[in-house]
Amino acid sequence: MAAISGEAKAALVERWESSCGTLAIEVQRVNGGRGRHYFTVDLLRGRRIYDSRIARTEDDARSRIDHAVRWAKVHGTSTYHRSFRAASAPASRASAGASYSSRPRKTWAVSLALFLIERTGSEDGRWSGKLDAEEQRALFGRFLGRGEICIDGERKCLLHRAQMLFAPGSRVTASLRWDAL
């Protein structure tokens, strides 16, 4: 938890846990002097805090929580669910039992098939080229990095090749089947 000075008291008001069980987000409400309060948003791996932020308002705390959950959804494989919520928690923008999870795997495969039909004219076609981060997230739900992406409709797989520093040629950094996205 972030440093709390003097007689300030902190209470856990919200906790999010990942489906893998090792990642968590804890929100604590800290009551400062003169009726003021603020929130600390702690990101945990195991039981150790690896990032902690102070939010002065409920909106700041909620946006930090939403950002952490969205980031984990895009860059990781696990989903988050709210395991605890107190009445004094920051106002939620989502429904009370909301779960943040990625789209169903079938929808990623459908979007890749539609992309191939648009670019090659066939669902079984093969396309390779560069896509920026926004396009990658919209197309298959994650950012693989800079480099060339090869989408093969016949084998239903996705390859990412990146240029290696101080090495000739490129190296395959990701090889994913559509049903594993």
Image: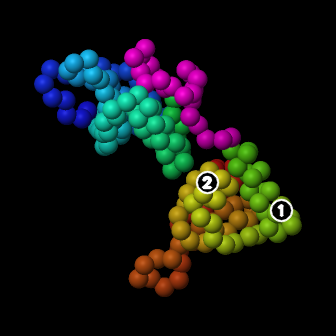
Answer with the quarter of the image where residue 22 lies: top left
Magenta span of residues: 82-104
Towards the viewer: 128 or 63: 63
Indicate the amino acid at tag 2: Arg
Towards the viewer: 31 or 22: 31
Q: Residue at x 41, y 35 (%)?
A: 60
Indicate the position of residue 47 as horizontal and vertical percent values. 31, 34
Name the secondary structure under disc 2. Answer: helix
- Residue hosting label 1: 117
- Residue hosting label 2: 137
Indicate the position of residue 167 as horizontal and vertical percent values. 44, 82
Side of 95 where 22 appears, left or right: left
Indicate the position of residue 121 as horizontal and vertical percent values. 86, 67
Name the secondary structure under disc 1. Answer: helix
N-terminal-most mark, 1 or 2: 1
Magenta stretch containing residue 45, yes or no? no
Q: Residue at x 66, y 41 (%)?
A: 103
Decide if residue 69 is in sight here. yes
Query: Few, some or many C-alpha atoms within 10 Å of disc 1 (few <14, some 14-19, many ≥20)?
Result: some
Query: Few, some or many C-alpha atoms within 10 Å of disc 2 (few <14, some 14-19, many ≥20)?
Result: some
Q: Residue at x 82, y 69 (%)?
A: 120
Indicate the amino acid at tag 1: Ile
- Quarter of the picture containing the N terminus is top left
**Up/down of 55 relative to 129, above or below:** above
Indicate the position of residue 108 as horizontal and vertical percent values. 70, 49
